Image: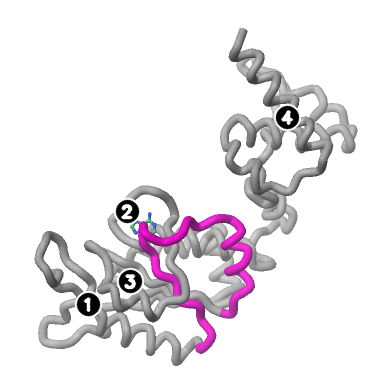
Amino acid sequence: MRFDIITLFPAFFDSPLRAGVLGRAVEKELFHIAIHNLRDWADPPHFAVDDTPYGGGGGMVMKPEPIRRALDAVRQGSRHSRVLLMTPQGRAFRQEDAVALAQEKGLTFLCGRYEGVDERVRAWVDDEFSIGDFVLSGGEFAALAMVDAVARLIPGVLGNELSAGEDSFGDGLLEYPHFTRPAEFAGMRVPEVLLSGNHGEIARWRRRERLRRTLERRPDLLDRARLTAEERSFVAALQRQGDEEEGS
Ligand code: ADE
């Protein structure tokens, strides 16, 4: 897998790509990542990358020419790269997108700044993503979040291969609660089942806790999650219990 990032702020990516899981993966060459400075494709003498909007109004718009040249240059090195535009107007990035994107040969992230990009740029991208319903000062934050979410699905990037599958959203549910030693702290005890050594019971408890937590915090996820009939009735029972408690 190859990641190309087109940005006006290459330095933004320096330390995140040297630290932690991503840093180790870069060092081990489990994927290749190249950061491109958009200004390298701007025209002399001023190397402007933005301009005022036609029709007036505030803010600046990113010019199309440097972006077109940057995309052409990146394509030379990575012919099959999928081009992704980071913008709050994009579709919401979800774990299932990370899983699909992890299958690609290459991903090119185009990071917007200012009021956004000239509308014609949209003709040259394969997809547009938003990482949430809030406005960031630039697409760099979104690109970094997406690179992390995709990279950790590449075999070998996570030390423990099991951990990606059990993550929140791995199968559409939030994660179960985790505990470590000591078994009792500040008057709070670890659930007995986790100390029992009974792996079947522990697995059942964890699955139920994932359902309970998802219902409490993100009920919207349950509509899309893959649940057995038994799990659906467990959720329905929890819901009834919740409704009764609210009513009483
Ligand atoms: N650029 C600015 N805000 C953004 C967001 N929420 N997601 C993706 N790119 C952005």
Give the residue number, with chain letter if any, for mark 3. 7
Above/below status of 122 relative to 88: below
Left or right: 38, with 107 as reference point: left
Chain part drawn in magenta: 79-105
Give amino acid for label 3: Thr
Give amino acid for label 1: Lys
The kind of secondary structure element at disc 3 is strand
What crowding class fits label 3: few (fewer than 14 Cα within 10 Å), some (14-19), or many (20 or more)? many
Residue 236's disc is 4
Give amino acid for label 2: Leu
Q: What scheme was used to colour the molecule?
A: one colour
Q: CA distance from mark 2 to mark 3?
A: 14 Å
Q: Of callouts 2 and 1, which one flags the residue occurring earlier in the amino acid sequence?
A: 1
Where is residue 197 drawn, in percent x and y? 88, 32
Residue 164's disc is none
Q: Nearer the viewer, mark 3 or mark 4?
A: 4
Give the residue number, with chain letter if any, for mark 2. 136
Q: Is residue 131 located in the magenta-colored stretch of the structure?
A: no
Q: CA distance from mark 3 to mark 1?
A: 13 Å
